[in-house]
């Protein structure tokens, strides 16, 4: 994609067409099926494409859909009916099959399932995907998100481990902290590239920055912050009740949010282990 093109709309259209054609050719070349995110795509000689959840490869009794825009409804909610703020989370519901005809319909369906996924996939393959590092992205934030500019490098690293690895997001993380600081995480094996921190990540980074500020303001005599103790208390309470019901995906203010707990595993668990070791040596 040329950055000097005088007509940006023509450029965008060209990239959309080129990515759609390249993606369909990639699927057509498959011996059997292709997997993109959690979607299995099976091409047929007639130019039709059969899409279903990858875990439903051999399933029968699926609900059939035949309009590319049905993918929007398929992608909207999780199995348990919760909104999916991040379409690349590995929580696409199962139980459906979508049959579409032609490359345009395939691209429309894929764009509902993974917004911008095939354009980014195409640009990455062509070596033309622009990558924006964390600091560049943070510099553009305003309002309540402006504070993510002050998140430490360590905070960015831990936030990315908690928020971006394959267990919680199937995109391949391509961005770094800044040009000199590599993001040291498992970047994932998926086909869909992630060229810059998304809005869910920025919101999570804001929460991690709040934790950093809390730590700077002071910890209790045992070395724990108020929110760390709140999270532990919430876990104990939920465990004692016999049900650990996780908060919604982007509710980072909630103690039982999965990404927040993943962050605690990286930062709180080592502290607890150290405290445990110290007290066992005292005995
Ligand atoms: S920033 Fe992280 S969570 Fe967001 S899409 Fe990229 S890899 Fe996924």
Image (spheres, rainbow, N blue to C red):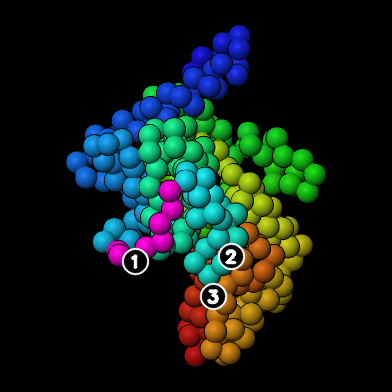
Mark 2 residue's CB less than 8 Å from ligand 1: no
Q: Secondary structure at mark 3?
A: helix
x, y percentage for residue 2? 51, 14
Vertical arrangement, residue 86 with respect to residue 224, above or below: above
**Label 1 vs label 2: CA separation?**
23 Å
Q: Earlier in the sequence, mark 1 or mark 2?
A: 1
Q: Can see residue 154?
A: no
Q: Is residue 139 left or right of residue 161?
A: right
Mark 3 neighbour class, 10 Å CA radius: few under 14, some 14 to 19, many 20 or more: some
Mark 2 neighbour class, 10 Å CA radius: few under 14, some 14 to 19, many 20 or more: few
**211 or 91, nearer to the observer:** 91
**Label 2 vs label 3: CA separation?**
33 Å
Q: Which residue does the image show at 44% across and 32% down from the upper left? A: 104
Rendering quarter of residue 46: top left
Q: Which residue does the image show at 56% across and 33% down from the upper left? A: 132
Q: Which residue does the image show at 72% across and 58% down from the upper left? A: 210
Question: What residue sits right under mark 2 in the picture?
Answer: 82
Q: Earlier in the sequence, mark 2 or mark 3?
A: 2
């Amino acid at each position: 994609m040329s950055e000097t093109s005088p007509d940006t709309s023509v450029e965008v259209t060209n990239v959309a067409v080129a990515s759609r054609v390249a993606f369909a050719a990639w699927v057509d070349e498959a011996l059997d099926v292709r997997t993109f995110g959690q979607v299995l795509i099976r091409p047929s000689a007639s130019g039709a494409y059969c899409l279903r959840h990858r875990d439903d490869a051999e399933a029968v009794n699926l609900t059939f859909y035949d309009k590319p825009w049905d993918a929007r409804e398929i992608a909207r909610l999780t199995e348990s009916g919760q909104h999916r703020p991040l379409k690349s989370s590995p929580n696409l519901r199962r139980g459906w099959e979508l049959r579409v005809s032609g490359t345009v319909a395939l691209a429309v369906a894929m764009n509902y399932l993974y917004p911008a996924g095939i354009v980014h996939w195409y640009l990455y393959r062509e070596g033309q995907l622009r990558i924006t590092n964390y600091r560049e992205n943070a510099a553009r934030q305003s309002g309540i998100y402006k504070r993510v500019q002050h998140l430490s490098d360590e905070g960015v690293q831990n936030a990315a481990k908690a928020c971006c690895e394959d267990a919680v997001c199937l995109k391949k993380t391509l961005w770094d902290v800044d040009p000199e600081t590599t993001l040291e995480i498992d970047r994932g094996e998926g086909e869909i590239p992630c060229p810059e921190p998304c809005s869910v990540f920025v919101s999570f980074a804001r929460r991690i920055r709040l934790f950093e500020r809390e730590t700077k303001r002071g910890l209790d005599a045992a070395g724990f912050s108020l929110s760390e103790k709140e999270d532990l208390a919430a876990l104990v309470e939920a465990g004692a009740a016999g049900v650990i019901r996780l908060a919604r995906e982007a509710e980072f203010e909630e103690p039982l949010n999965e990404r927040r707990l993943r962050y605690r595993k990286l930062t709180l668990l080592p502290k607890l282990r150290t405290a445990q070791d110290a007290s066992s040596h005292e005995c």
